[in-house]
Amino acid sequence: MKQMAEDAWNAVCTEIHNHRINGEPGWKPDNWNETLEFRYDTWLIQHGFKRPEVNPSILNGAKLPSAGYPSSGPFAFSFIDSIGHYCIEETSGDGADRFYKMTERYKSRVPKGIEPNNVLRIPVMVRGAIAQLPAEARKDATILVANILRDYVEDEV
């Protein structure tokens, strides 16, 4: 079912892309909304049709020193911003239901004194970072990240 949904989404995105690059830049399917447009933009980035765009003015209200914020490197603003967008997408709409189910499943294992959301949002952030990798490498990368995190806990890193 998951593969069928992914294939259907890829077909829709391919159709939109074909319309937009062939003279219909504003074309969109019926019932299209901003959330789906964001997902489509993510699809474009994942498939190499678009590079992530960063609007530095976003930092104006963020109380971050925009001049010192890195424009390249492992924690460039574009990377952090893309994970933020992914997290919002994954915990909104249908994603909110999935996040709630995950919270219900694991909340009994959350250490005492910690709000479940403070722990359970971490996997969503990691998944957002993993989603930026090529699809064929995501499983191995996720296993590697899990091992690195285990080593952090054991003070081996």
Image (tube, rainbow, N blue to C red):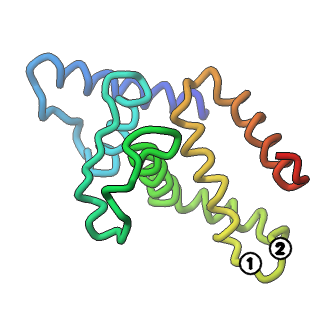
Compared with residue 157, is residue 8 higher up or lower down, i.e. above or below? above
Compared with residue 121, is residue 143 higher up or lower down, i.e. above or below? above
Image position of 125 (left or right of 53): right
Point out residue 20 in the picture as x, y percentages from the top left corner. Answer: 17, 25
Residue 102 is drawn in which quadrant? bottom right
The answer to whether the residue labelled 1 contacts the one labelled 2, judged by CB atoms less than 8 Å apart, is: yes
Residue 111's tag is 2
Residue 16's tag is none
What is the CA distance from the residue labelled 1 to the residue labelled 2?
6 Å
What is the three-letter code of the residue carrying label 2?
Pro
Name the quarter where the N terminus is drawn.
top right
Foreground: 3 or 129? 129
Point out residue 76 in the picture as x, y percentages from the top left corner. Answer: 44, 45
Residue at left 23%, top 36%? 29
Residue at which label 1 appears: 114
Image position of 19 (left or right of 91): left
What is the three-letter code of the residue carrying label 1?
Ile
Residue at left 56%, top 42%? 129
Residue at left 26%, top 45%? 32
Point out residue 151 in the picture as x, y percentages from the top left corner. Answer: 86, 46
Tell me the crowding category of disc 2: few under 14, some 14 to 19, or many 20 or more residues within 10 angstroms, Cα based. Answer: few
Foreground: 151 or 141? 151
Numbered disc 2: secondary structure:
loop
Point out residue 156 in the picture as x, y percentages from the top left corner. Answer: 88, 47
